[in-house]
Image: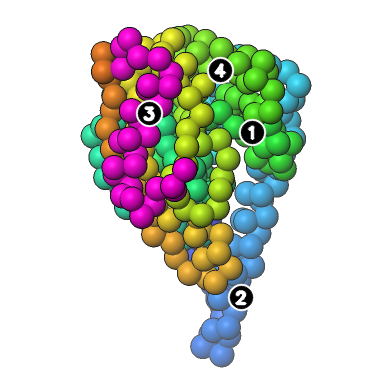
């Protein structure tokens, strides 16, 4: 949407300049130059808008509700970003997404691009994430995450991590957002599925929402392919929606083992780490 609008506007500006100057065949060079200049101007304006919008965010103030304005901005910019970096998504199992009520999305974690891909795919579902604390200080990213209710977690402090889990439970119960989690905790960088931390499954246990099990393949190649000017094919598979009655009575370790098993079976042994 954003790229398309900038392209159309740049073409109109270029045409208007050429017509105004009554450029003939000897001035054919003027059209592409005007188009490029107009497009770069649109890119600068888009960046300045995002910069000002993020600069207006007070991250010290608790965000009580999901921001429709900032989520709309994120939707438009992420869609353009996915196009620009040439990420080609191959999606299966979209029918698994619950259409009514909140849910918990559980996914393997291969790259920092994973939340971007999932926000793009789940753009109509008010999805947010548990995220590492360091992300809150990142340029542009931190303010946007704050406005869409992302919950920072201190992975080195169990007491603080529990507070984050409790807040996620509250947000789902209050119908604010659906929660996305990466139970591996860390990005290992090897493209393999690793052991889960079971604590995040307390969110499902205490809210009784469906657990949407999702796997990603090849998202760890995005950054290297950008440097090589190559597209990246990313497989996204929504494997199964585990209904509350399917995990009723299980503790968090048992729920984690069940979800891990579904992911491991879907990915295949070649993409599962031996631990």
> What colouring method underlies this structural image?
rainbow
- Residue 68 visible here: yes
Check disc 4 and report its element: helix, strand or loop: helix
How far apart, in angstroms, are the residues tagged by discs 3 and 4? 19 Å
Tell me the magenta residue range: 247-275
Instruction: Determine crowd level at label 1: few under 14, some 14-19, many 20+ residues with C-alpha closer than 10 A.
Output: some
Q: Which residue is mark 2?
A: 33
Q: Find residue 165 and name its label.
A: 4
Task: Give the quadrant of residue 107.
Answer: top left
First in sequence: mark 4 vs mark 2: 2
Nearest the viewer among 50 and 240 is 240
Q: Which residue reaches farthest bottom?
A: 26
Q: Which residue matches tag 1?
A: 132
Crowding at label 2, few (<14), some or many (≥20) Cα neighbours within 10 Å? Answer: few
Spatial CA span between label 1 and label 4 = 13 Å
Q: Earlier in the sequence, mark 2 or mark 1?
A: 2
For the residues labelled 4 and 2, the Cα–Cα distance comes to 53 Å
Where in the figure is residue 243, as x and y percent of width and height?
27, 19
Instruction: Determine whether 112 is above or below 256 in the image.
Output: below
Task: Return the disc, 3 or 4, that comes first in the chain's sequence.
Answer: 4
């Amino acid at each position: 949407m954003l790229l398309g609008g900038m392209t159309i506007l740049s073409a109109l500006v270029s045409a208007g300049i050429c017509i105004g100057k009554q450029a003939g065949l000897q001035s054919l060079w003027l059209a592409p130059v005007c188009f490029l200049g107009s497009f770069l101007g649109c890119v600068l304006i888009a960046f300045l808008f995002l910069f000002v919008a993020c600069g207006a965010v007070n991250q010290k103030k608790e965000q009580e509700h999901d921001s429709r304005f900032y989520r709309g901005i994120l939707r438009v910019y992420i869609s353009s970003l996915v196009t620009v970096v040439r990420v080609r998504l191959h999606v299966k199992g979209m029918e698994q997404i619950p259409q009514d009520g909140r849910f918990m999305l559980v996914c393997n974690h291969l790259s920092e691009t994973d939340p971007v891909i999932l926000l793009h795919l789940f753009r109509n579902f008010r999805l947010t994430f548990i995220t590492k604390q360091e992300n809150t200080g990142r340029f542009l990213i931190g303010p946007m995450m704050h406005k869409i209710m992302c919950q920072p977690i201190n992975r080195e402090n169990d007491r603080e991590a529990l507070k984050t889990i409790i807040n996620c439970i509250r947000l789902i119960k209050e119908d604010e957002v659906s929660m996305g989690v990466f139970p591996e905790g860390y990005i290992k960088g090897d493209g393999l599925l690793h052991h889960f931390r079971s604590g995040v499954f307390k969110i499902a246990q205490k809210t009784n929402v469906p657990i949407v099990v999702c796997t990603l393949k090849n998202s760890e190649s995005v950054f290297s392919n950008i440097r090589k000017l190559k597209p990246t094919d990313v497989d996204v598979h929504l494997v199964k929606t585990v209904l509350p009655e399917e995990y009723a009575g299980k503790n968090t370790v048992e729920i984690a083992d069940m979800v891990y098993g579904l992911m491991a079976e879907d990915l295949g042994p070649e993409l599962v780490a031996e631990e």
